Image (cartoon, helix red, strand yellow):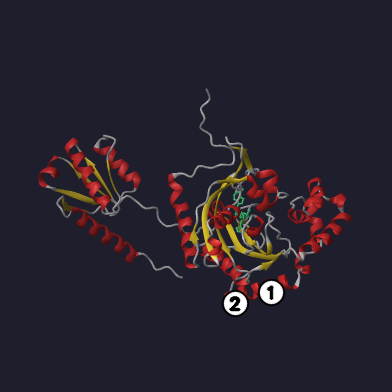
Protein backbone atom coordinates (compact mmCIF):
# COMPACT_ATOMS: atom_id res chain seq x y z
CA UNK A 1 0.00 0.00 0.00
CA UNK A 2 1.23 3.52 -0.85
CA UNK A 3 2.06 5.43 2.34
CA UNK A 4 -0.16 8.47 2.94
CA UNK A 5 2.40 11.08 3.87
CA UNK A 6 1.50 13.91 1.54
CA UNK A 7 -0.70 16.79 2.73
CA UNK A 8 -3.73 17.64 0.55
CA UNK A 9 -3.02 20.05 -2.32
CA UNK A 10 -3.11 23.70 -1.26
CA UNK A 11 -2.40 23.00 2.42
CA UNK A 12 0.84 23.51 4.31
CA UNK A 13 2.27 22.10 7.51
CA UNK A 14 3.70 24.74 9.80
CA UNK A 15 6.90 23.34 11.20
CA UNK A 16 8.15 23.71 14.79
CA UNK A 17 11.21 25.59 13.47
CA UNK A 18 8.93 28.28 12.00
CA UNK A 19 6.25 28.43 14.67
CA UNK A 20 7.82 31.32 16.57
CA UNK A 21 7.30 33.48 13.47
CA UNK A 22 3.59 32.61 13.38
CA UNK A 23 3.21 33.19 17.09
CA UNK A 24 5.01 36.53 16.75
CA UNK A 25 2.62 37.71 14.01
CA UNK A 26 -0.52 36.43 15.76
CA UNK A 27 0.45 37.88 19.15
CA UNK A 28 1.55 41.20 17.70
CA UNK A 29 -1.73 41.55 15.81
CA UNK A 30 -3.77 40.72 18.94
CA UNK A 31 -1.76 43.11 21.08
CA UNK A 32 -2.12 46.00 18.61
CA UNK A 33 -5.87 45.24 18.39
CA UNK A 34 -6.06 45.36 22.20
CA UNK A 35 -4.69 48.93 22.09
CA UNK A 36 -7.80 49.83 20.09
CA UNK A 37 -10.13 48.02 22.51
CA UNK A 38 -10.64 44.82 20.46
CA UNK A 39 -11.15 41.50 22.25
CA UNK A 40 -10.52 38.09 20.74
CA UNK A 41 -13.44 35.88 19.74
CA UNK A 42 -13.23 32.18 18.75
CA UNK A 43 -15.92 30.79 16.50
CA UNK A 44 -16.49 27.36 14.89
CA UNK A 45 -14.49 26.26 11.86
CA UNK A 46 -17.70 25.24 10.10
CA UNK A 47 -21.11 26.88 9.86
CA UNK A 48 -24.43 26.20 8.18
CA UNK A 49 -23.90 26.70 4.43
CA UNK A 50 -26.86 29.11 4.35
CA UNK A 51 -24.86 31.64 6.41
CA UNK A 52 -22.30 32.09 3.63
CA UNK A 53 -24.91 32.04 0.85
CA UNK A 54 -26.59 35.00 2.53
CA UNK A 55 -23.50 36.67 3.98
CA UNK A 56 -20.82 36.37 1.31
CA UNK A 57 -23.39 36.33 -1.51
CA UNK A 58 -24.52 33.47 -3.76
CA UNK A 59 -23.17 35.03 -6.98
CA UNK A 60 -19.60 35.46 -5.70
CA UNK A 61 -16.73 33.22 -6.79
CA UNK A 62 -16.20 32.24 -3.16
CA UNK A 63 -19.70 30.78 -2.88
CA UNK A 64 -20.07 29.49 -6.43
CA UNK A 65 -16.70 27.83 -6.87
CA UNK A 66 -14.60 27.81 -3.75
CA UNK A 67 -16.54 26.53 -0.76
CA UNK A 68 -15.84 23.23 0.95
CA UNK A 69 -19.45 22.15 1.44
CA UNK A 70 -20.69 18.74 2.56
CA UNK A 71 -23.64 17.02 4.17
CA UNK A 72 -23.01 15.91 7.74
CA UNK A 73 -24.40 12.66 9.12
CA UNK A 74 -27.57 14.51 10.16
CA UNK A 75 -28.10 15.55 6.52
CA UNK A 76 -27.34 19.23 7.26
CA UNK A 77 -25.41 21.24 4.68
CA UNK A 78 -22.21 22.38 6.36
CA UNK A 79 -19.40 24.59 5.00
CA UNK A 80 -15.83 25.05 6.20
CA UNK A 81 -15.59 28.82 6.67
CA UNK A 82 -14.15 30.55 3.59
CA UNK A 83 -13.78 33.77 5.63
CA UNK A 84 -14.34 35.02 9.18
CA UNK A 85 -16.81 37.91 9.04
CA UNK A 86 -20.02 35.89 8.50
CA UNK A 87 -19.32 33.50 11.39
CA UNK A 88 -18.32 36.30 13.73
CA UNK A 89 -21.56 38.17 12.86
CA UNK A 90 -23.57 35.02 13.52
CA UNK A 91 -21.85 34.57 16.89
CA UNK A 92 -22.31 38.24 17.84
CA UNK A 93 -26.04 38.01 17.13
CA UNK A 94 -26.51 34.63 18.83
CA UNK A 95 -24.62 35.72 21.96
CA UNK A 96 -26.36 39.11 22.23
CA UNK A 97 -23.14 41.10 21.85
CA UNK A 98 -25.04 43.68 19.83
CA UNK A 99 -27.42 44.58 22.64
CA UNK A 100 -24.48 45.36 24.95
CA UNK A 101 -22.15 48.34 24.74
CA UNK A 102 -21.42 49.53 21.21
CA UNK A 103 -19.35 49.50 19.19
CA UNK A 104 -18.63 45.82 19.73
CA UNK A 105 -14.96 45.32 18.89
CA UNK A 106 -13.95 41.76 18.02
CA UNK A 107 -10.78 40.23 16.60
CA UNK A 108 -9.74 36.73 15.59
CA UNK A 109 -6.94 34.48 14.34
CA UNK A 110 -8.52 31.75 12.22
CA UNK A 111 -7.94 29.26 9.43
CA UNK A 112 -10.12 29.59 6.29
CA UNK A 113 -10.82 27.23 3.41
CA UNK A 114 -11.28 28.08 -0.25
CA UNK A 115 -11.03 25.66 -3.17
CA UNK A 116 -8.74 27.87 -5.28
CA UNK A 117 -5.92 27.13 -7.69
CA UNK A 118 -2.92 27.01 -5.36
CA UNK A 119 0.06 29.25 -6.10
CA UNK A 120 2.55 31.32 -4.08
CA UNK A 121 0.47 33.20 -1.50
CA UNK A 122 -2.75 31.41 -2.43
CA UNK A 123 -3.70 28.29 -0.52
CA UNK A 124 -6.77 26.15 0.00
CA UNK A 125 -6.32 26.30 3.75
CA UNK A 126 -4.94 29.66 4.83
CA UNK A 127 -4.92 31.78 7.96
CA UNK A 128 -6.31 35.20 8.71
CA UNK A 129 -6.05 37.78 11.42
CA UNK A 130 -9.26 39.80 11.29
CA UNK A 131 -11.18 42.43 13.19
CA UNK A 132 -14.80 43.58 13.15
CA UNK A 133 -16.15 46.81 14.65
CA UNK A 134 -19.93 46.65 14.97
CA UNK A 135 -22.56 49.27 15.65
CA UNK A 136 -21.16 52.57 14.41
CA UNK A 137 -22.24 54.15 11.10
CA UNK A 138 -19.57 56.86 11.46
CA UNK A 139 -16.47 57.14 9.24
CA UNK A 140 -14.65 57.37 12.58
CA UNK A 141 -14.95 53.56 12.72
CA UNK A 142 -13.66 53.12 9.16
CA UNK A 143 -10.65 55.31 9.96
CA UNK A 144 -10.01 53.50 13.24
CA UNK A 145 -10.07 50.11 11.54
CA UNK A 146 -7.72 51.27 8.75
CA UNK A 147 -5.39 52.80 11.33
CA UNK A 148 -5.37 49.50 13.22
CA UNK A 149 -4.44 47.56 10.06
CA UNK A 150 -1.62 49.98 9.31
CA UNK A 151 -0.43 49.82 12.91
CA UNK A 152 -0.25 46.01 12.74
CA UNK A 153 1.77 46.18 9.50
CA UNK A 154 4.09 48.85 10.98
CA UNK A 155 4.54 46.88 14.19
CA UNK A 156 5.56 43.83 12.18
CA UNK A 157 8.20 45.95 10.41
CA UNK A 158 6.47 45.53 7.05
CA UNK A 159 7.48 48.12 4.49
CA UNK A 160 6.48 48.93 0.92
CA UNK A 161 2.75 48.33 1.31
CA UNK A 162 0.27 50.76 -0.28
CA UNK A 163 -3.21 51.43 1.03
CA UNK A 164 -5.89 51.69 -1.67
CA UNK A 165 -9.36 52.93 -0.79
CA UNK A 166 -12.66 53.26 -2.62
CA UNK A 167 -16.37 53.62 -1.94
CA UNK A 168 -18.82 51.22 -3.56
CA UNK A 169 -21.94 53.07 -2.39
CA UNK A 170 -25.01 51.75 -0.63
CA UNK A 171 -28.33 50.12 -1.48
CA UNK A 172 -29.65 53.54 -2.54
CA UNK A 173 -26.98 54.59 -5.02
CA UNK A 174 -25.49 51.28 -6.17
CA UNK A 175 -28.48 49.96 -8.17
CA UNK A 176 -28.49 53.12 -10.32
CA UNK A 177 -24.76 52.76 -10.90
CA UNK A 178 -25.14 49.06 -11.71
CA UNK A 179 -27.60 50.00 -14.45
CA UNK A 180 -25.09 52.44 -15.92
CA UNK A 181 -22.32 49.84 -15.74
CA UNK A 182 -24.56 47.21 -17.28
CA UNK A 183 -25.58 49.51 -20.11
CA UNK A 184 -21.90 50.26 -20.85
CA UNK A 185 -20.90 46.58 -20.71
CA UNK A 186 -23.90 45.50 -22.79
CA UNK A 187 -22.55 47.63 -25.60
CA UNK A 188 -19.26 45.71 -25.42
CA UNK A 189 -20.65 42.28 -24.55
CA UNK A 190 -18.64 40.59 -27.31
CA UNK A 191 -15.36 41.57 -25.68
CA UNK A 192 -16.31 40.05 -22.32
CA UNK A 193 -15.02 36.63 -21.27
CA UNK A 194 -17.71 33.89 -21.12
CA UNK A 195 -17.89 34.04 -17.29
CA UNK A 196 -18.36 37.83 -17.31
CA UNK A 197 -21.13 37.48 -19.90
CA UNK A 198 -22.99 35.49 -17.25
CA UNK A 199 -22.00 37.99 -14.56
CA UNK A 200 -23.59 40.72 -16.65
CA UNK A 201 -26.94 39.19 -15.70
CA UNK A 202 -26.20 38.03 -12.14
CA UNK A 203 -23.75 40.54 -10.62
CA UNK A 204 -22.14 43.07 -13.04
CA UNK A 205 -20.01 44.60 -10.25
CA UNK A 206 -17.95 41.36 -10.18
CA UNK A 207 -16.79 42.08 -13.75
CA UNK A 208 -14.68 44.96 -12.37
CA UNK A 209 -12.60 42.32 -10.56
CA UNK A 210 -12.04 40.07 -13.61
CA UNK A 211 -8.40 39.43 -14.40
CA UNK A 212 -9.02 38.52 -18.09
CA UNK A 213 -7.20 41.08 -20.26
CA UNK A 214 -10.18 41.83 -22.52
CA UNK A 215 -12.44 42.48 -19.51
CA UNK A 216 -9.96 44.61 -17.56
CA UNK A 217 -9.35 46.70 -20.69
CA UNK A 218 -13.09 47.37 -20.95
CA UNK A 219 -13.29 48.21 -17.26
CA UNK A 220 -10.66 50.96 -17.66
CA UNK A 221 -13.19 53.02 -19.61
CA UNK A 222 -16.27 51.94 -17.62
CA UNK A 223 -18.25 54.36 -15.42
CA UNK A 224 -16.94 54.38 -11.85
CA UNK A 225 -19.05 53.96 -8.71
CA UNK A 226 -17.07 56.71 -6.97
CA UNK A 227 -18.51 59.24 -9.50
CA UNK A 228 -22.08 58.17 -8.79
CA UNK A 229 -22.30 58.09 -5.00
CA UNK A 230 -25.38 59.47 -3.24
CA UNK A 231 -24.77 62.48 -0.95
CA UNK A 232 -24.70 60.28 2.17
CA UNK A 233 -22.01 57.94 0.76
CA UNK A 234 -20.11 60.83 -0.75
CA UNK A 235 -20.00 62.69 2.60
CA UNK A 236 -19.00 59.47 4.37
CA UNK A 237 -16.07 58.95 2.00
CA UNK A 238 -15.03 62.61 2.23
CA UNK A 239 -14.96 62.48 6.02
CA UNK A 240 -13.02 59.20 5.99
CA UNK A 241 -10.36 60.82 3.81
CA UNK A 242 -10.22 63.86 6.13
CA UNK A 243 -9.73 61.56 9.08
CA UNK A 244 -7.00 59.53 7.36
CA UNK A 245 -5.24 62.75 6.33
CA UNK A 246 -5.37 64.03 9.90
CA UNK A 247 -3.97 60.70 11.16
CA UNK A 248 -1.12 60.94 8.64
CA UNK A 249 -2.14 57.72 6.88
CA UNK A 250 -1.16 57.76 3.20
CA UNK A 251 -3.53 56.20 0.69
CA UNK A 252 -4.32 56.08 -3.01
CA UNK A 253 -7.80 56.14 -4.47
CA UNK A 254 -8.55 53.09 -6.60
CA UNK A 255 -12.02 53.31 -8.17
CA UNK A 256 -11.73 49.67 -9.33
CA UNK A 257 -11.60 48.05 -5.89
CA UNK A 258 -14.90 46.21 -5.45
CA UNK A 259 -13.72 43.26 -3.30
CA UNK A 260 -14.79 39.68 -3.89
CA UNK A 261 -17.53 39.43 -1.26
CA UNK A 262 -21.03 40.84 -1.66
CA UNK A 263 -21.63 42.29 1.80
CA UNK A 264 -19.62 45.48 1.37
CA UNK A 265 -21.19 48.95 1.34
CA UNK A 266 -19.52 52.37 1.22
CA UNK A 267 -15.82 52.06 2.19
CA UNK A 268 -13.63 49.28 0.79
CA UNK A 269 -9.87 49.12 1.13
CA UNK A 270 -6.83 46.94 0.49
CA UNK A 271 -3.19 47.02 1.55
CA UNK A 272 -1.11 45.79 -1.38
CA UNK A 273 2.57 45.01 -1.88
CA UNK A 274 4.41 44.19 -5.09
CA UNK A 275 7.23 42.28 -3.40
CA UNK A 276 5.57 38.82 -3.18
CA UNK A 277 4.29 38.27 -6.71
CA UNK A 278 0.75 38.21 -8.04
CA UNK A 279 -0.99 37.62 -4.68
CA UNK A 280 0.08 40.93 -3.22
CA UNK A 281 -3.04 41.88 -1.24
CA UNK A 282 -2.00 41.36 2.36
CA UNK A 283 -5.12 42.90 3.89
CA UNK A 284 -8.65 43.54 2.63
CA UNK A 285 -11.67 45.00 4.29
CA UNK A 286 -14.48 47.48 4.33
CA UNK A 287 -17.87 48.47 5.67
CA UNK A 288 -20.87 46.13 5.59
CA UNK A 289 -23.93 48.04 6.75
CA UNK A 290 -26.53 45.44 5.69
CA UNK A 291 -24.85 42.16 6.66
CA UNK A 292 -25.99 41.85 10.28
CA UNK A 293 -29.62 42.40 9.30
CA UNK A 294 -29.26 40.09 6.28
CA UNK A 295 -28.38 37.14 8.49
CA UNK A 296 -31.14 37.82 11.03
CA UNK A 297 -29.68 40.36 13.47
CA UNK A 298 -30.59 43.95 14.32
CA UNK A 299 -30.20 46.76 11.80
CA UNK A 300 -26.64 47.64 12.74
CA UNK A 301 -23.65 48.57 10.61
CA UNK A 302 -20.13 47.14 10.77
CA UNK A 303 -16.65 47.57 9.38
CA UNK A 304 -13.57 45.35 9.49
CA UNK A 305 -10.69 43.72 7.67
CA UNK A 306 -8.71 40.50 7.45
CA UNK A 307 -5.02 39.93 6.76
CA UNK A 308 -3.59 36.76 5.26
CA UNK A 309 -0.97 35.50 7.71
CA UNK A 310 0.91 33.47 5.06
CA UNK A 311 1.16 36.61 2.93
CA UNK A 312 2.26 38.73 5.90
CA UNK A 313 5.05 36.24 6.58
CA UNK A 314 6.09 36.28 2.92
CA UNK A 315 6.31 40.09 2.93
CA UNK A 316 8.20 40.05 6.22
CA UNK A 317 10.78 37.68 4.72
CA UNK A 318 10.95 39.73 1.51
CA UNK A 319 11.46 43.08 3.26
CA UNK A 320 13.72 41.55 5.91
CA UNK A 321 11.44 42.55 8.77
CA UNK A 322 12.92 41.59 12.14
CA UNK A 323 11.63 38.48 13.87
CA UNK A 324 12.23 38.06 17.60
CA UNK A 325 14.81 35.44 18.48
CA UNK A 326 13.48 31.97 18.94
CA UNK A 327 13.33 31.15 22.65
CA UNK A 328 16.32 28.90 23.43
CA UNK A 329 16.72 26.29 26.12
CA UNK A 330 18.55 27.98 29.02
CA UNK A 331 20.26 24.93 30.51
CA UNK A 332 20.97 21.41 29.33
CA UNK A 333 21.96 19.06 32.14
CA UNK A 334 23.94 16.13 30.76
CA UNK A 335 24.40 13.08 32.94
CA UNK A 336 26.48 9.92 33.28
CA UNK A 337 24.82 6.93 34.91
CA UNK A 338 21.32 6.26 36.18
CA UNK A 339 21.64 8.07 39.51
CA UNK A 340 22.90 11.23 37.81
CA UNK A 341 20.17 10.97 35.18
CA UNK A 342 17.50 10.88 37.91
CA UNK A 343 19.10 13.89 39.63
CA UNK A 344 19.29 15.76 36.27
CA UNK A 345 15.56 15.13 35.67
CA UNK A 346 14.72 16.42 39.11
CA UNK A 347 16.85 19.57 38.65
CA UNK A 348 15.29 20.43 35.25
CA UNK A 349 11.88 19.84 36.79
CA UNK A 350 12.66 22.38 39.52
CA UNK A 351 13.94 24.89 36.94
CA UNK A 352 10.83 24.51 34.78
CA UNK A 353 8.60 25.10 37.79
CA UNK A 354 10.47 28.40 38.24
CA UNK A 355 9.75 29.31 34.60
CA UNK A 356 13.22 28.50 33.26
CA UNK A 357 13.47 26.40 30.09
CA UNK A 358 15.69 23.41 30.83
CA UNK A 359 16.35 19.96 29.35
CA UNK A 360 18.04 16.72 30.30
CA UNK A 361 18.66 13.50 28.36
CA UNK A 362 15.74 11.09 27.89
CA UNK A 363 17.43 9.04 25.15
CA UNK A 364 20.14 7.28 27.20
CA UNK A 365 22.80 8.80 24.97
CA UNK A 366 26.55 8.91 25.55
CA UNK A 367 27.90 12.07 27.14
CA UNK A 368 29.39 13.12 23.79
CA UNK A 369 26.03 12.66 22.05
CA UNK A 370 24.24 14.59 24.80
CA UNK A 371 26.60 17.53 24.34
CA UNK A 372 26.14 17.40 20.57
CA UNK A 373 22.36 17.59 21.14
CA UNK A 374 22.77 20.58 23.50
CA UNK A 375 24.89 22.32 20.90
CA UNK A 376 22.38 21.66 18.09
CA UNK A 377 19.54 22.95 20.26
CA UNK A 378 21.51 26.15 20.92
CA UNK A 379 21.23 25.71 24.71
CA UNK A 380 22.68 28.75 26.50
CA UNK A 381 24.36 26.80 29.32
CA UNK A 382 25.30 23.17 29.90
CA UNK A 383 26.21 21.25 33.02
CA UNK A 384 27.50 17.68 33.41
CA UNK A 385 26.42 15.47 36.32
CA UNK A 386 28.44 12.37 37.21
CA UNK A 387 29.35 10.49 40.40
CA UNK A 388 31.73 13.18 41.70
CA UNK A 389 29.20 16.01 41.12
CA UNK A 390 26.58 14.01 43.02
CA UNK A 391 28.99 13.37 45.88
CA UNK A 392 30.23 17.01 46.09
CA UNK A 393 26.77 18.50 45.46
CA UNK A 394 28.33 20.96 43.01
CA UNK A 395 28.84 21.03 39.24
CA UNK A 396 30.47 23.10 36.51
CA UNK A 397 28.24 25.40 34.50
CA UNK A 398 29.44 26.24 30.98
CA UNK A 399 28.31 29.24 28.96
CA UNK A 400 28.08 27.69 25.48
CA UNK A 401 28.67 31.02 23.75
CA UNK A 402 31.61 32.49 25.68
CA UNK A 403 32.89 29.05 26.87
CA UNK A 404 33.33 30.57 30.34
CA UNK A 405 32.83 28.11 33.20
CA UNK A 406 31.90 28.50 36.85
CA UNK A 407 30.93 26.25 39.72
CA UNK A 408 27.38 26.09 40.97
CA UNK A 409 26.11 24.34 44.09
CA UNK A 410 23.33 21.82 43.70
CA UNK A 411 21.60 22.97 46.88
CA UNK A 412 18.18 24.40 47.73
CA UNK A 413 19.12 27.71 46.07
CA UNK A 414 20.21 26.15 42.77
CA UNK A 415 17.30 27.56 40.72
CA UNK A 416 17.67 31.01 42.25
CA UNK A 417 21.41 31.07 41.58
CA UNK A 418 21.05 29.83 38.02
CA UNK A 419 18.23 32.33 37.41
CA UNK A 420 20.54 35.13 38.54
CA UNK A 421 23.35 33.97 36.22
CA UNK A 422 20.87 33.86 33.34
CA UNK A 423 19.59 37.39 33.99
CA UNK A 424 23.19 38.70 34.27
CA UNK A 425 23.97 37.17 30.87
CA UNK A 426 20.85 38.62 29.24
CA UNK A 427 21.51 42.04 30.77
CA UNK A 428 25.10 42.04 29.53
CA UNK A 429 23.97 41.12 26.03
CA UNK A 430 21.40 43.92 26.06
CA UNK A 431 23.93 46.48 27.29
CA UNK A 432 26.55 45.35 24.77
CA UNK A 433 24.12 45.44 21.82
CA UNK A 434 24.59 48.44 19.49
CA UNK A 435 21.82 51.03 19.76
CA UNK A 436 19.38 50.83 16.86
CA UNK A 437 18.28 54.03 15.19
CA UNK A 438 14.52 54.55 15.52
P1 LIG B 1 -10.64 38.65 1.66
O1 LIG B 1 -10.11 39.78 0.85
O2 LIG B 1 -11.36 37.59 0.97
O3 LIG B 1 -11.56 39.30 2.79
O4 LIG B 1 -9.46 37.99 2.49
C1 LIG B 1 -8.65 38.77 3.33
C2 LIG B 1 -7.19 38.41 3.14
O5 LIG B 1 -7.00 37.01 3.32
C3 LIG B 1 -6.65 38.68 1.76
O6 LIG B 1 -6.28 40.03 1.61
C4 LIG B 1 -5.44 37.77 1.71
O7 LIG B 1 -4.35 38.37 2.39
C5 LIG B 1 -5.92 36.57 2.52
N1 LIG B 1 -6.38 35.49 1.60
C6 LIG B 1 -7.56 35.38 0.97
N2 LIG B 1 -7.62 34.26 0.25
C7 LIG B 1 -6.46 33.61 0.43
C8 LIG B 1 -5.90 32.38 -0.04
N3 LIG B 1 -6.57 31.55 -0.82
N4 LIG B 1 -4.65 32.04 0.35
C9 LIG B 1 -3.94 32.85 1.18
N5 LIG B 1 -4.42 34.02 1.66
C10 LIG B 1 -5.65 34.40 1.30
C11 LIG B 1 -12.20 38.60 3.75
O8 LIG B 1 -12.00 37.44 4.00
C12 LIG B 1 -13.12 39.46 4.59
N6 LIG B 1 -13.80 38.59 5.55
C13 LIG B 1 -12.33 40.56 5.27
C14 LIG B 1 -13.19 41.45 6.12
C15 LIG B 1 -13.33 41.40 7.45
N7 LIG B 1 -13.96 42.41 5.65
C16 LIG B 1 -14.60 42.97 6.67
N8 LIG B 1 -14.23 42.36 7.77
State the image coordinates of residue 230 (x, y, percent, origin top left): 76, 70
Other-residue count near label 2 (Cα within 10 Å), few / some / many at <14 / 14–19 / ≥20? few
Residue 238, numbered label: 1
Q: Earlier in the sequence, mark 1 or mark 2?
A: 1
Dividing the picture into quadrants, the one containing residue 420 is bottom left
Q: Nearer the viewer, residue 282 or 76?
A: 76
CA distance separating discs 1 and 2 = 12 Å
State the image coordinates of residue 156 (x, y, percent, origin top left): 50, 61
Q: Which residue is mark 2?
A: 246
Which residue is at a point 45% across and 70% down the rendered structure image? 437
State the image coordinates of residue 288 (x, y, percent, origin top left): 65, 61
Work out which residue is located at the far right of the displayed protein and give it.
187
Task: From the viewer's perspective, tell me whether residue 90 is left or right of residue 21.
Answer: right
Question: Could you tell me which secondary element the residue under label 1 belongs to?
Answer: helix
State the image coordinates of residue 383 (x, y, percent, origin top left): 22, 47
Q: Is mark 1 within 8 Å of ligand 1?
A: no
Q: Nearer the viewer, mark 1 or mark 2?
A: 1
Which quarter of the rendered image does ligand 1 occupy?
bottom right
Task: From the viewer's perspective, tell me whether residue 277 is left or right of residue 423.
Answer: right
Other-residue count near label 1 (Cα within 10 Å), few / some / many at <14 / 14–19 / ≥20? few
Q: Nearer the viewer, residue 186 or 41?
A: 41
Q: Is mark 2 within 8 Å of ligand 1?
A: no
Work out which residue is located at the far top of the displayed protein and give it.
1
Which residue is at a point 55% across and 51% down the rendered structure image? 310
Q: Is residue 180 above or below residue 338?
A: below
User: In this rendering, does residue 270 appear at all?
Assistant: no
Which residue is at a point 47% across and 64% down the rendered structure image? 34
Question: Could you tell me which secondary element the residue under label 2 belongs to?
Answer: helix
Amino acid sequence: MKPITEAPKGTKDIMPKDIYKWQHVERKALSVAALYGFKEIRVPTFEHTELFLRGVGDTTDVVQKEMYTFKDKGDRSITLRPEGTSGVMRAAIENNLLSEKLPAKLCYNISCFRYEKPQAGRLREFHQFGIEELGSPSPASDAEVISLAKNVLDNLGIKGVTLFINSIGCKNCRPRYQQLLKAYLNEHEDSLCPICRQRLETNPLRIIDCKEKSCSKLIEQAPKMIDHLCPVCSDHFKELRERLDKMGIDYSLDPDIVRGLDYYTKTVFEFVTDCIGAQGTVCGGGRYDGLIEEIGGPKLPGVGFAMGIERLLMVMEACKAPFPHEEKCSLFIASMGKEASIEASSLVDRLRKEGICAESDNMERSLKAQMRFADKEGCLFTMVLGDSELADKRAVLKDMQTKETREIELDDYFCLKFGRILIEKQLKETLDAPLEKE
